[in-house]
Amino acid sequence: MKLEIGNILITDVQFGNVTKVENHVLYVNKAEIKTLVLEDERIENVTIELARPGESKRITPVKDVIEPRVKVSGNGSMFPGIISKVDTVGCGRTHVLKGSAIVTCGKIVGFQEGIIDMTGPGADYTPFSKLNNVCLVIEPIAGLKQYDYEAAARMAGLKIATYVGNAAKDIEPDEIQVFETKPMFEQSAAYPELPKVGYVYMLQTQGLLHDTYVYGVDAKQIVPTIMYPTEIMDGAIISGNCVSACDKNTTYHHLNNPIIQNLYKRHGKDLNFMGIIITNENVYLADKERSSNFTAKLAEFLGLDGVIVSQEGFGNPDTDLIMNCKKIEQTGIKTVIVTDEYAGRDGLSQSLADADVKADAVVTGGNANEVIILPPMETIIGTDAYINTIAGGFDGSLHEDGSIKVEIQAITGATNELGFNKLSAKSL
């Protein structure tokens, strides 16, 4: 498949009478957004607020972040199986409002939603502080169950990202990037002298608000399979989970997966990027064995020389990560795993819940237990009432002046296991 990504650079976001892009400014119609969101009877009300880089604003609790995109040509539309029909996407042209995002927040669903500070030390830990954000503060109807609330908030974000993304359809992009992966045998023959490299993309699927969707299907229901990388850029995979904010893959992360981006940069130069194997993170041992067996089998079937394996979440999924690594290595294929660490506040505890000698090439996104003090902000978008009980928080985290002492696992994207942020660690 061949996909052109046309980036339209956004430097500011403002409210306007019409949702449009003009001189790199995104204008959004607040009334139209509210009407679209309130079509869902599960939502009592929604407040739309804007948050720009450098403003003294704190967005919390964050549920998802989505980049506005629109299909201009090729099969299907954005977010197939959820917003649009179940067409195979990943070809043609897609326009992106680069530098903007839709952020869903509001009353907390679980206990693992996070914080985005638009300025101050916390802003350095999240990539979303650099974006021009349209925030949807969602208020569910009374008595709505948390699973229905999560689904309603998820749909609201995707719906508004699609609505805003349509503003990019007829605009000439500032830059165009081209990504192409050919059918397996053709791709293998294209660069016979280069090592064939694949990407094992682990998706959070532990249930109980820990879900990811592939073409609209809960990924816990799949067995590992092969995908074109360009499908991911058109929204074939979206987030539906409330894992710890620091290493959650938001929908924005999926759309902009840096492992995919960097493999394409090196494609045809020093490696042959063969494609993606998606797999799930299961709860029960038998399911973990099944999925890791399939993953290793597919890597061998593709004739890969090397594999990058990325994780989402921590603890129980560490076992899936190590199983995938070990079994792929046993086929003779070299692996590199990408994860983060929960090594205690002093950094001296065991970083992962599982380990193996074959996992000897590791990229880390940093230690999620590191403690930070976030200064008070002038504006809270959402509510900070839950801070003491969120993952990474503790009794007394929220101070009377509005400052917060918290582990960085409470910051959205701080230790992302796709390597999306700048934080890392090294052995001493």
Image (cartoon, rainbow, N blue to C red):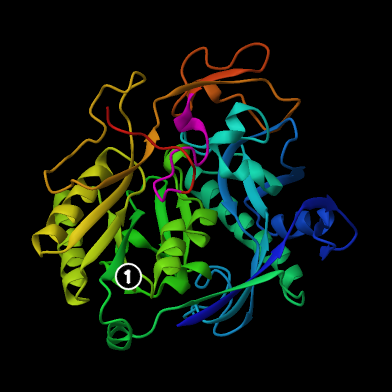
* Residue 52, above or below 14: above
Query: Is residue 334 toward the left or the right of residue 169 in the image?
Result: left
- Residue 79 falls inside the magenta stretch: no
Q: Which residue is mark 1?
A: 271
Using the image as rendered, state which of residue 170 and residue 113 is in the foreground. Answer: 170
Give percent across and percent down for residue 41: 65, 55
Question: Does the magenta stretch mainly form a helix, a strand or a loop?
Answer: loop
In the rendered image, the vertical position of residue 20 relative to residue 420, given as above or below: below
Quadrant in which residue 37 is drawn: bottom right
**Total label count?**
1
Q: Quadrant of the C terminus?
A: top left
Q: Amino acid at mark 1?
A: Leu
Question: What stretch of residues is rendered in magenta?
Answer: 407-419
Check disc 1: other Cα within 10 Å, few if <14, some if 14-19, many if 20+. Answer: many
Q: Residue furthest right?
A: 17
In the rendered structure, the answer to whether residue 375 lies left or right of residue 285 reads right
Where is residue 106? Give x, y as percent: 63, 39
Is residue 418 covered in magenta? Answer: yes
Above or below 115: residue 100: below
Q: At which x and y percent is residue 276?
A: 34, 69
Please state the horizontal and vertical placement of residue 245, each as a whole percent of the image: 48, 38
What residue is rendered at 76% in x and 25% in y?
A: 378
State the residue in front, 57 or 331: 331
Q: Is residue 115 visible?
A: no
Q: Residue at x 45, y 50 (%)?
A: 249
Task: Give the quadrant of the N terminus.
Answer: bottom left
Which secondary structure lies at badge 1?
Answer: loop
> Does any portion of residue 321 appear in the rendered image?
yes
Left or right of 300 on screen, residue 345 = right
